[in-house]
Image: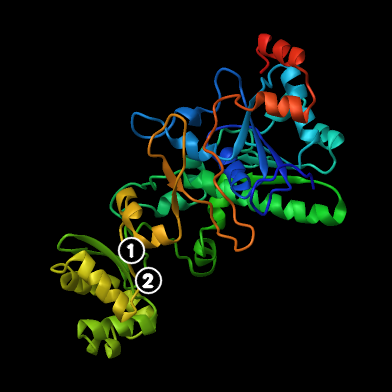
Amino acid sequence: MTQTTQRQGALNDLRVIELGQLIAGPFCGQLFADHGADVIKVEAPGAGDPLRDWGRGDIPTWWAVAGRNKRCVTADMRKPEGRDLVLALAEKADVLIENFRPGTLEKWSMGHDVLKARNPRLVLVRVSGFGQTGPYAPRAGYASVGEAMGGMRHLCGEPDRPPSRAGLSLGDTLAASFAFMGALMALKERDRSGEGQVVDSAIYEAVLAVMEATVPEYTVNGEIRGRTGAKLAGIAPSNVYPCADGDLLIAANQDSVFERLCRFMGREDWIRDPRFVDHRARGANQDLLDGLIADWTRPQKVADLEAAMIDAGVPAGRINRAPEMLADPQFAAREAIIDVPHPTIPNLKMQNVFPKLSRTPGEVAWPGAALGAHNDDVYRDLLGLDAARLDALRNAKVI
Protein backbone atom coordinates (compact mmCIF):
# COMPACT_ATOMS: atom_id res chain seq x y z
CA MET A 1 0.00 0.00 0.00
CA THR A 2 1.04 3.58 -0.58
CA GLN A 3 2.72 5.41 2.27
CA THR A 4 1.10 8.82 2.37
CA THR A 5 0.54 10.98 5.42
CA GLN A 6 1.05 10.83 9.14
CA ARG A 7 -2.67 11.23 9.77
CA GLN A 8 -4.12 9.29 12.68
CA GLY A 9 -6.21 6.22 11.89
CA ALA A 10 -6.16 2.62 10.75
CA LEU A 11 -6.15 3.56 7.04
CA ASN A 12 -3.36 6.16 7.08
CA ASP A 13 -1.28 4.15 4.59
CA LEU A 14 -3.92 4.53 1.86
CA ARG A 15 -4.42 7.21 -0.76
CA VAL A 16 -7.92 7.67 -2.18
CA ILE A 17 -9.01 9.79 -5.14
CA GLU A 18 -12.61 10.94 -4.82
CA LEU A 19 -14.49 11.99 -7.96
CA GLY A 20 -18.18 12.71 -8.28
CA GLN A 21 -20.35 14.85 -6.06
CA LEU A 22 -23.34 15.10 -3.75
CA ILE A 23 -23.86 12.40 -1.17
CA ALA A 24 -22.96 8.80 -2.03
CA GLY A 25 -19.43 9.23 -3.40
CA PRO A 26 -18.43 11.89 -0.86
CA PHE A 27 -19.77 9.86 2.08
CA CYS A 28 -17.69 6.88 0.97
CA GLY A 29 -14.69 9.19 0.77
CA GLN A 30 -15.51 10.61 4.19
CA LEU A 31 -15.40 7.15 5.74
CA PHE A 32 -11.91 6.63 4.35
CA ALA A 33 -10.78 10.11 5.42
CA ASP A 34 -12.22 9.72 8.92
CA HIS A 35 -9.93 6.76 9.48
CA GLY A 36 -6.77 8.41 8.24
CA ALA A 37 -6.63 7.80 4.49
CA ASP A 38 -5.22 10.60 2.35
CA VAL A 39 -8.39 11.42 0.43
CA ILE A 40 -7.90 13.81 -2.49
CA LYS A 41 -11.23 15.29 -3.50
CA VAL A 42 -11.34 16.37 -7.15
CA GLU A 43 -13.89 19.04 -8.10
CA ALA A 44 -14.71 21.13 -11.14
CA PRO A 45 -12.98 24.52 -10.99
CA GLY A 46 -15.25 27.47 -10.30
CA ALA A 47 -18.15 25.27 -9.18
CA GLY A 48 -17.21 22.45 -6.87
CA ASP A 49 -19.43 19.90 -5.21
CA PRO A 50 -23.02 21.21 -4.77
CA LEU A 51 -22.81 19.99 -1.17
CA ARG A 52 -20.77 23.11 -0.50
CA ASP A 53 -24.02 25.08 -0.63
CA TRP A 54 -26.28 22.56 1.10
CA GLY A 55 -27.61 22.56 4.65
CA ARG A 56 -30.44 24.17 6.61
CA GLY A 57 -30.16 27.75 7.82
CA ASP A 58 -28.37 30.83 6.61
CA ILE A 59 -24.88 29.29 6.80
CA PRO A 60 -24.39 26.09 4.74
CA THR A 61 -22.71 23.53 6.99
CA TRP A 62 -23.10 20.17 5.22
CA TRP A 63 -19.79 20.52 3.40
CA ALA A 64 -17.94 21.00 6.69
CA VAL A 65 -18.89 17.40 7.51
CA ALA A 66 -18.84 15.78 4.06
CA GLY A 67 -15.52 17.35 3.11
CA ARG A 68 -13.75 16.89 6.42
CA ASN A 69 -10.24 15.44 6.43
CA LYS A 70 -10.01 15.65 2.62
CA ARG A 71 -7.48 17.49 0.49
CA CYS A 72 -9.40 19.50 -2.09
CA VAL A 73 -8.11 20.04 -5.63
CA THR A 74 -9.73 21.19 -8.84
CA ALA A 75 -9.52 19.63 -12.30
CA ASP A 76 -11.85 20.00 -15.26
CA MET A 77 -12.23 16.41 -16.42
CA ARG A 78 -14.04 17.56 -19.55
CA LYS A 79 -10.67 18.82 -20.77
CA PRO A 80 -7.81 16.49 -21.73
CA GLU A 81 -5.39 18.28 -19.41
CA GLY A 82 -7.77 17.80 -16.49
CA ARG A 83 -8.18 14.12 -17.23
CA ASP A 84 -4.41 13.77 -17.43
CA LEU A 85 -4.09 15.22 -13.93
CA VAL A 86 -6.63 12.76 -12.53
CA LEU A 87 -4.98 9.80 -14.29
CA ALA A 88 -1.62 10.87 -12.86
CA LEU A 89 -3.19 10.97 -9.38
CA ALA A 90 -4.72 7.53 -9.96
CA GLU A 91 -1.25 6.13 -10.64
CA LYS A 92 -0.29 7.07 -7.09
CA ALA A 93 -3.51 5.93 -5.40
CA ASP A 94 -4.91 2.79 -3.85
CA VAL A 95 -8.59 3.58 -4.41
CA LEU A 96 -10.54 5.77 -6.82
CA ILE A 97 -14.18 6.55 -5.98
CA GLU A 98 -16.68 7.80 -8.56
CA ASN A 99 -20.45 8.18 -8.51
CA PHE A 100 -21.16 9.46 -11.99
CA ARG A 101 -23.84 7.96 -14.19
CA PRO A 102 -22.47 4.67 -15.60
CA GLY A 103 -20.53 5.25 -18.79
CA THR A 104 -19.31 8.73 -17.88
CA LEU A 105 -15.75 7.68 -17.09
CA GLU A 106 -15.66 5.62 -20.28
CA LYS A 107 -16.86 8.62 -22.28
CA TRP A 108 -13.91 10.54 -20.87
CA SER A 109 -11.51 7.69 -21.74
CA MET A 110 -11.00 7.00 -18.03
CA GLY A 111 -12.76 3.65 -17.71
CA HIS A 112 -11.49 0.69 -15.73
CA ASP A 113 -9.39 -0.61 -18.61
CA VAL A 114 -7.52 2.70 -18.81
CA LEU A 115 -7.11 3.02 -15.06
CA LYS A 116 -5.95 -0.59 -14.74
CA ALA A 117 -3.33 -0.05 -17.45
CA ARG A 118 -2.00 2.94 -15.53
CA ASN A 119 -2.21 1.28 -12.09
CA PRO A 120 -3.00 -2.46 -11.91
CA ARG A 121 -3.28 -2.28 -8.11
CA LEU A 122 -5.98 0.39 -8.13
CA VAL A 123 -9.38 -0.44 -6.62
CA LEU A 124 -12.10 1.37 -8.58
CA VAL A 125 -15.20 2.05 -6.47
CA ARG A 126 -18.30 2.84 -8.52
CA VAL A 127 -21.49 4.01 -6.80
CA SER A 128 -24.63 4.49 -8.89
CA GLY A 129 -28.38 4.15 -8.73
CA PHE A 130 -28.68 0.76 -10.42
CA GLY A 131 -25.14 -0.54 -10.82
CA GLN A 132 -22.89 -0.74 -13.85
CA THR A 133 -24.87 -3.47 -15.65
CA GLY A 134 -28.47 -4.37 -16.40
CA PRO A 135 -31.22 -2.56 -18.33
CA TYR A 136 -31.52 0.23 -15.72
CA ALA A 137 -27.80 0.99 -15.51
CA PRO A 138 -27.93 4.08 -17.78
CA ARG A 139 -30.69 5.71 -15.73
CA ALA A 140 -30.04 8.61 -13.39
CA GLY A 141 -30.40 7.21 -9.90
CA TYR A 142 -31.05 9.30 -6.81
CA ALA A 143 -31.34 7.91 -3.30
CA SER A 144 -35.10 8.49 -3.26
CA VAL A 145 -35.54 6.31 -6.36
CA GLY A 146 -33.30 3.56 -4.97
CA GLU A 147 -35.20 3.61 -1.67
CA ALA A 148 -38.48 3.23 -3.56
CA MET A 149 -37.32 0.47 -5.90
CA GLY A 150 -35.40 -1.39 -3.20
CA GLY A 151 -38.55 -1.69 -1.10
CA MET A 152 -37.84 0.73 1.74
CA ARG A 153 -40.33 3.45 0.84
CA HIS A 154 -43.21 0.98 0.73
CA LEU A 155 -42.65 0.30 4.43
CA CYS A 156 -42.21 3.92 5.57
CA GLY A 157 -45.09 5.92 6.97
CA GLU A 158 -48.59 5.33 8.26
CA PRO A 159 -50.70 2.53 6.76
CA ASP A 160 -53.52 4.89 5.73
CA ARG A 161 -51.25 7.34 3.89
CA PRO A 162 -48.92 7.26 0.88
CA PRO A 163 -45.36 6.02 1.41
CA SER A 164 -43.19 8.45 3.34
CA ARG A 165 -39.43 8.88 3.70
CA ALA A 166 -36.90 9.37 6.42
CA GLY A 167 -35.57 12.91 6.73
CA LEU A 168 -32.18 11.67 5.52
CA SER A 169 -30.74 10.32 2.27
CA LEU A 170 -30.49 6.76 3.53
CA GLY A 171 -30.10 5.18 0.09
CA ASP A 172 -26.99 7.25 -0.59
CA THR A 173 -25.33 6.57 2.75
CA LEU A 174 -26.18 2.87 2.60
CA ALA A 175 -24.68 2.55 -0.89
CA ALA A 176 -21.62 4.51 0.23
CA SER A 177 -21.20 2.30 3.30
CA PHE A 178 -21.39 -0.86 1.19
CA ALA A 179 -18.93 0.72 -1.25
CA PHE A 180 -16.54 1.40 1.62
CA MET A 181 -16.83 -2.19 2.84
CA GLY A 182 -16.36 -3.49 -0.67
CA ALA A 183 -13.24 -1.39 -1.10
CA LEU A 184 -11.75 -2.75 2.12
CA MET A 185 -12.48 -6.29 0.93
CA ALA A 186 -10.88 -5.57 -2.43
CA LEU A 187 -7.80 -4.12 -0.70
CA LYS A 188 -7.57 -7.20 1.49
CA GLU A 189 -7.73 -9.43 -1.60
CA ARG A 190 -5.13 -7.24 -3.28
CA ASP A 191 -2.73 -8.20 -0.50
CA ARG A 192 -2.92 -11.76 -1.87
CA SER A 193 -3.22 -11.21 -5.61
CA GLY A 194 -1.44 -7.89 -6.10
CA GLU A 195 -4.30 -6.71 -8.32
CA GLY A 196 -7.10 -4.25 -7.88
CA GLN A 197 -10.67 -4.74 -9.02
CA VAL A 198 -14.00 -2.94 -9.44
CA VAL A 199 -16.41 -2.45 -6.53
CA ASP A 200 -19.90 -1.94 -7.98
CA SER A 201 -22.30 -0.52 -5.35
CA ALA A 202 -25.88 0.21 -6.44
CA ILE A 203 -28.24 2.27 -4.31
CA TYR A 204 -31.26 0.03 -4.86
CA GLU A 205 -29.21 -3.07 -3.92
CA ALA A 206 -27.82 -1.41 -0.80
CA VAL A 207 -31.41 -0.73 0.24
CA LEU A 208 -32.43 -4.28 -0.66
CA ALA A 209 -29.58 -5.63 1.49
CA VAL A 210 -31.16 -4.20 4.66
CA MET A 211 -34.70 -5.31 3.87
CA GLU A 212 -34.47 -8.20 6.35
CA ALA A 213 -36.76 -11.12 5.43
CA THR A 214 -39.25 -9.25 3.28
CA VAL A 215 -38.49 -11.29 0.14
CA PRO A 216 -38.57 -14.80 1.67
CA GLU A 217 -41.63 -13.84 3.72
CA TYR A 218 -43.39 -13.39 0.39
CA THR A 219 -41.93 -16.34 -1.52
CA VAL A 220 -42.40 -18.78 1.36
CA ASN A 221 -45.53 -17.48 3.09
CA GLY A 222 -47.14 -15.10 0.62
CA GLU A 223 -46.78 -12.26 3.11
CA ILE A 224 -46.15 -8.71 1.92
CA ARG A 225 -45.12 -6.33 4.67
CA GLY A 226 -46.96 -3.03 4.77
CA ARG A 227 -46.58 0.32 6.46
CA THR A 228 -47.03 0.23 10.22
CA GLY A 229 -46.06 3.74 11.27
CA ALA A 230 -44.07 4.01 14.48
CA LYS A 231 -44.34 0.32 15.28
CA LEU A 232 -42.83 -2.76 13.66
CA ALA A 233 -45.61 -5.23 12.93
CA GLY A 234 -45.48 -8.32 15.12
CA ILE A 235 -42.84 -6.90 17.48
CA ALA A 236 -44.50 -5.88 20.74
CA PRO A 237 -44.27 -3.98 22.88
CA SER A 238 -41.81 -1.77 21.02
CA ASN A 239 -43.13 1.66 20.23
CA VAL A 240 -43.13 5.34 21.03
CA TYR A 241 -45.46 5.93 23.95
CA PRO A 242 -47.03 9.26 24.96
CA CYS A 243 -46.13 10.94 28.24
CA ALA A 244 -47.38 14.09 29.93
CA ASP A 245 -44.53 16.18 28.51
CA GLY A 246 -43.36 14.29 25.44
CA ASP A 247 -42.77 10.77 24.15
CA LEU A 248 -40.59 7.84 25.19
CA LEU A 249 -39.58 4.82 23.16
CA ILE A 250 -39.91 1.60 25.15
CA ALA A 251 -38.68 -1.69 23.69
CA ALA A 252 -39.77 -4.66 25.79
CA ASN A 253 -40.58 -7.24 23.14
CA GLN A 254 -38.25 -10.00 24.39
CA ASP A 255 -39.99 -12.39 26.83
CA SER A 256 -37.72 -11.73 29.81
CA VAL A 257 -37.81 -7.96 29.27
CA PHE A 258 -41.58 -7.99 28.90
CA GLU A 259 -41.82 -9.77 32.24
CA ARG A 260 -39.74 -7.04 33.88
CA LEU A 261 -42.01 -4.38 32.40
CA CYS A 262 -45.11 -6.22 33.61
CA ARG A 263 -43.78 -6.48 37.14
CA PHE A 264 -42.87 -2.82 37.23
CA MET A 265 -46.34 -1.88 35.97
CA GLY A 266 -47.97 -4.10 38.55
CA ARG A 267 -49.44 -6.27 35.82
CA GLU A 268 -47.88 -9.64 36.57
CA ASP A 269 -51.11 -11.17 35.25
CA TRP A 270 -50.03 -10.20 31.74
CA ILE A 271 -47.08 -12.60 31.96
CA ARG A 272 -49.48 -15.57 31.87
CA ASP A 273 -52.22 -13.90 29.84
CA PRO A 274 -52.73 -15.96 26.63
CA ARG A 275 -52.87 -12.72 24.66
CA PHE A 276 -49.35 -11.70 25.77
CA VAL A 277 -47.70 -14.93 26.88
CA ASP A 278 -45.06 -15.07 24.16
CA HIS A 279 -43.64 -13.23 21.14
CA ARG A 280 -46.24 -14.43 18.66
CA ALA A 281 -49.16 -13.78 21.00
CA ARG A 282 -48.01 -10.24 21.73
CA GLY A 283 -47.49 -9.62 18.01
CA ALA A 284 -51.03 -10.79 17.24
CA ASN A 285 -52.41 -8.45 19.93
CA GLN A 286 -50.00 -5.59 19.31
CA ASP A 287 -52.52 -2.76 19.05
CA LEU A 288 -54.31 -3.83 22.24
CA LEU A 289 -51.05 -4.09 24.18
CA ASP A 290 -49.74 -0.77 22.86
CA GLY A 291 -52.97 0.92 23.89
CA LEU A 292 -52.80 -0.46 27.41
CA ILE A 293 -49.20 0.63 27.86
CA ALA A 294 -49.97 4.08 26.40
CA ASP A 295 -52.74 4.53 28.96
CA TRP A 296 -50.18 3.81 31.68
CA THR A 297 -47.44 6.09 30.30
CA ARG A 298 -49.67 9.05 29.37
CA PRO A 299 -49.83 10.76 32.81
CA GLN A 300 -46.12 10.27 33.56
CA LYS A 301 -43.22 12.61 32.82
CA VAL A 302 -40.59 11.49 30.32
CA ALA A 303 -37.63 11.89 32.68
CA ASP A 304 -39.32 9.98 35.49
CA LEU A 305 -40.47 7.16 33.26
CA GLU A 306 -37.11 6.87 31.53
CA ALA A 307 -35.33 6.60 34.89
CA ALA A 308 -37.85 4.01 36.06
CA MET A 309 -37.41 1.91 32.93
CA ILE A 310 -33.63 2.00 33.31
CA ASP A 311 -33.90 0.86 36.93
CA ALA A 312 -36.27 -1.91 35.89
CA GLY A 313 -33.92 -3.14 33.15
CA VAL A 314 -36.30 -2.22 30.33
CA PRO A 315 -34.69 -0.59 27.26
CA ALA A 316 -36.02 2.93 26.77
CA GLY A 317 -34.84 6.14 25.16
CA ARG A 318 -35.93 9.66 24.41
CA ILE A 319 -36.70 10.94 20.92
CA ASN A 320 -33.63 13.14 20.56
CA ARG A 321 -33.08 16.14 18.35
CA ALA A 322 -29.80 18.02 18.04
CA PRO A 323 -30.36 20.04 21.27
CA GLU A 324 -31.01 16.91 23.31
CA MET A 325 -27.97 15.13 21.85
CA LEU A 326 -25.75 18.07 22.77
CA ALA A 327 -27.02 17.93 26.36
CA ASP A 328 -26.88 14.15 26.75
CA PRO A 329 -24.16 12.88 29.12
CA GLN A 330 -23.66 9.68 27.12
CA PHE A 331 -22.87 11.68 23.98
CA ALA A 332 -20.49 13.83 26.00
CA ALA A 333 -18.73 10.93 27.73
CA ARG A 334 -17.96 9.22 24.42
CA GLU A 335 -17.29 12.46 22.54
CA ALA A 336 -19.91 11.46 20.01
CA ILE A 337 -20.28 15.13 19.05
CA ILE A 338 -17.17 17.30 18.88
CA ASP A 339 -16.18 20.92 18.36
CA VAL A 340 -14.36 21.49 15.08
CA PRO A 341 -12.59 24.83 14.54
CA HIS A 342 -13.50 26.50 11.25
CA PRO A 343 -12.11 29.70 9.72
CA THR A 344 -15.54 31.18 8.94
CA ILE A 345 -18.25 29.09 10.66
CA PRO A 346 -18.71 29.78 14.39
CA ASN A 347 -19.76 27.15 16.92
CA LEU A 348 -19.27 24.28 14.49
CA LYS A 349 -20.11 20.96 16.11
CA MET A 350 -20.49 17.68 14.28
CA GLN A 351 -20.62 13.93 14.78
CA ASN A 352 -17.31 12.28 15.58
CA VAL A 353 -15.67 9.39 13.72
CA PHE A 354 -17.34 5.99 14.07
CA PRO A 355 -16.76 3.21 14.86
CA LYS A 356 -14.26 3.75 17.65
CA LEU A 357 -11.05 1.74 17.38
CA SER A 358 -9.04 1.19 20.55
CA ARG A 359 -5.49 1.42 19.14
CA THR A 360 -5.90 3.28 15.86
CA PRO A 361 -8.86 5.63 16.25
CA GLY A 362 -9.83 7.98 13.48
CA GLU A 363 -10.06 11.73 13.88
CA VAL A 364 -11.54 14.90 12.48
CA ALA A 365 -8.34 16.74 11.59
CA TRP A 366 -10.01 19.61 9.70
CA PRO A 367 -13.45 20.51 8.32
CA GLY A 368 -14.29 20.65 4.62
CA ALA A 369 -11.72 22.88 2.93
CA ALA A 370 -12.16 25.64 0.36
CA LEU A 371 -12.44 24.77 -3.32
CA GLY A 372 -8.97 24.02 -4.68
CA ALA A 373 -7.35 24.69 -1.31
CA HIS A 374 -4.76 21.94 -1.81
CA ASN A 375 -4.00 22.40 -5.51
CA ASP A 376 -0.40 23.46 -4.91
CA ASP A 377 0.28 20.83 -2.23
CA VAL A 378 -1.05 17.95 -4.31
CA TYR A 379 -0.01 18.91 -7.82
CA ARG A 380 3.39 20.26 -6.80
CA ASP A 381 4.40 17.81 -4.10
CA LEU A 382 2.69 14.67 -5.38
CA LEU A 383 2.86 15.12 -9.16
CA GLY A 384 5.94 17.32 -9.30
CA LEU A 385 4.44 20.19 -11.30
CA ASP A 386 6.37 23.44 -11.11
CA ALA A 387 4.95 26.93 -10.55
CA ALA A 388 4.93 27.80 -14.25
CA ARG A 389 2.92 24.68 -15.13
CA LEU A 390 0.44 25.35 -12.31
CA ASP A 391 -0.03 28.93 -13.50
CA ALA A 392 -0.64 27.71 -17.04
CA LEU A 393 -3.27 25.24 -15.83
CA ARG A 394 -4.99 27.98 -13.85
CA ASN A 395 -4.98 30.38 -16.77
CA ALA A 396 -6.51 27.69 -19.00
CA LYS A 397 -9.16 27.05 -16.30
CA VAL A 398 -8.12 23.41 -16.07
CA ILE A 399 -7.71 23.78 -12.30
Farthest left residue in view: 299
Q: Nearer the viewer, residue 264 or 152?
A: 264
Q: Amino acid at mark 1?
A: Lys
Residue 354: percent from the left, percent from the top? 53, 55
Q: Secondary structure at mark 1?
A: loop
Say which residue label 2 marks. 235
Residue 343: percent from the left, percent from the top? 47, 30
Q: Residues within 10 Å of mark 1 (few under 14, many from 20)?
A: some
Quadrant of the image for the C terminus? top right
Residue sitting at x 16%, y 71%: 295
Residue sitting at x 25%, y 86%: 263
Q: CA distance from mark 1 to mark 2?
A: 8 Å
Residue sitting at x 45%, y 36%: 62
Q: Is residue 244 above or below residue 45?
A: below
Q: Is residue 378 left or right of residue 192?
A: left
User: Is there CB contact under 8 Å for labels 1 and 2?
Assistant: yes
Residue sitting at x 53%, y 58%: 210
Q: Is residue 393 above or below residue 376?
A: above
Say which residue label 1 marks. 231
Residue 88 seen in the current view:
yes
